[in-house]
Image (spheres, rainbow, N blue to C red):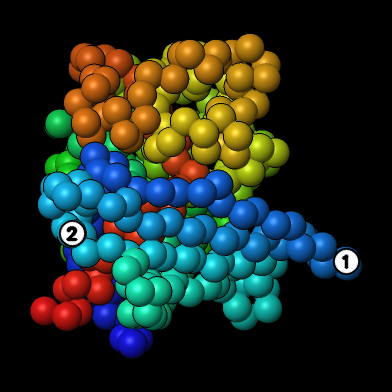
Amino acid sequence: MLNISSEDIGRLADYPAIADALADAFRGRYEVPLRHHHTIDLEGRPEATLLLMPAWTSPSGDKAASPAGEKAYVGLKSVTIYPDNPARGEPTVQGMYFLLDGGTGRPLALIDGPELTVRRTAAASALAARYLAREDASSMLMVGSGALSPCLIRAHMSVRPIASVAIWNRNVGKAGDLASTLRAEGIDARAVEDLEGAVRGADLISCATISSVPLVLGEWLAPGTHVDLVGAFRPDLRETDDEVMRRGTVFVDTRPGGLSEAGDVVQAVKSGALREEDIAADLFELTRGEKPGRSGADEITVFKSVGTAIEDLAAAILVYEAALG
């Protein structure tokens, strides 16, 4: 059995390759049971979350049915989310991915879960941006500066001609640290304190926070903006207000996840700012050409992602097969 580290993942698969694998997976045949979402009560501390995400490739005689071809795979991701871990010197998100042979159940690989997660999450946003962000999008605002933020920036830069990146965080020092890291890579990045001004000046806005109150307001959005929402993975969290959902054409990674777990969508539906039927498409429909993406240069597009085990399995297969050479 292979043991694939976070460093291995970065070496074996870049963002465009992962985005391509995800596109193939959304066009393919996968079985994805409802993910298990468990709350862990911690006395005197913020509650933690345990996520179990299984998936497997469906039998098919068509080699184009999945990125794995005729070989069958089963995968399971186990992830914990402890919001106060950074204060304890530990990552917020920890976990592992288990890849198995779908024909025999034989373990094939143990893959670093957090690295696989952040890279497939960022690649999913990049995949959506291929359909939803303007082709000339050159300025980006990153809201949040956690572990996922640099991945989102690099992923979006791999599919759009992003020339400058503004980074906002409640802790401006953390935003500055990320900007310095990115500048060392040759990226024109800067920390900003004026969130409204940064929103108004961005072609593409990506949010990766666990905020329970709106950060990005719809009245601030300029025509043609693409809004990528990756945080707020529970119904009680949100990164945008109702006006963002009213003004924008809303897309999701999966409809079941978007309508049950995505706080920005769930709360907007509850308030009446968004109807379920207003969701224009999910990644299945976009990648299969069943629904259109952006319809014009001035359209505001919103993509809400909560993640799906399809993405984990597709990325794990890609990394595993690349490791085999």
User: Residue at 46% of width from left, 14% of height from top?
Assistant: 278
Q: Position of residue 302 (x, y in %)?
A: 40, 28
158 horizontally vs 104: left or right: left
Q: Residue shown at 88%/66% (left/top)?
A: 44
Q: Position of residue 137 (x, y in %)?
A: 20, 34
Q: How dense is the environment of label 2, judged by Cα within 10 Å: few (below 14), some, or many (20 and up)?
A: some
**Residue type, label 1:** Gly
Kindly identify the amino acid type of the residue bearing the numbered disc 2: Glu
Mark seen at residue 44: 1
Q: CA distance from mark 2 to mark 1?
A: 50 Å
Asked if residue 258 lies left or right of residue 286, the reply is right
On the rendered structure, is 195 left or right of 297? Answer: right
293 or 60, which is in the foreground? 60
The residue nearer to you, when weighing 105 against 186, is 105
Q: Is residue 293 left or right of residue 150?
A: left
**Residue 203 in sight here:** no
The image position of residue 311, as x and y in percent, is: 36, 53
Q: Foreground residue, 83 or 312?
A: 312
Instruction: For the residues labelled 2 and 1, say whether their Cβ atoms are less than 8 Å apart.
Output: no
Q: Position of residue 210 (x, y in %)?
A: 60, 49
Give the quarter of the figure containing the C terminus.
bottom left
> Element under label 2?
loop
Whether residue 243 is situated above or below residue 212 in the rendered picture: above
Graded by Cα atoms within 10 Å as few (under 14), some (14 to 19) or many (20 or more), the crowding at tag 1 reads few
Q: Which residue is at 49% across, 44% downward? A: 306
Q: Is residue 72 visible?
A: yes
Q: In the rendering, which numbered label is found on residue 93?
A: none
> How many numbered tags mark residues here?
2
Q: Which mark is residue 70?
A: 2
Instruction: Please report the residue visible at 48 percent of the width from the left and 59 percent of the height from the top.
Output: 54
> Judging from the image, what secondary structure is the residue with disc 1 in?
loop
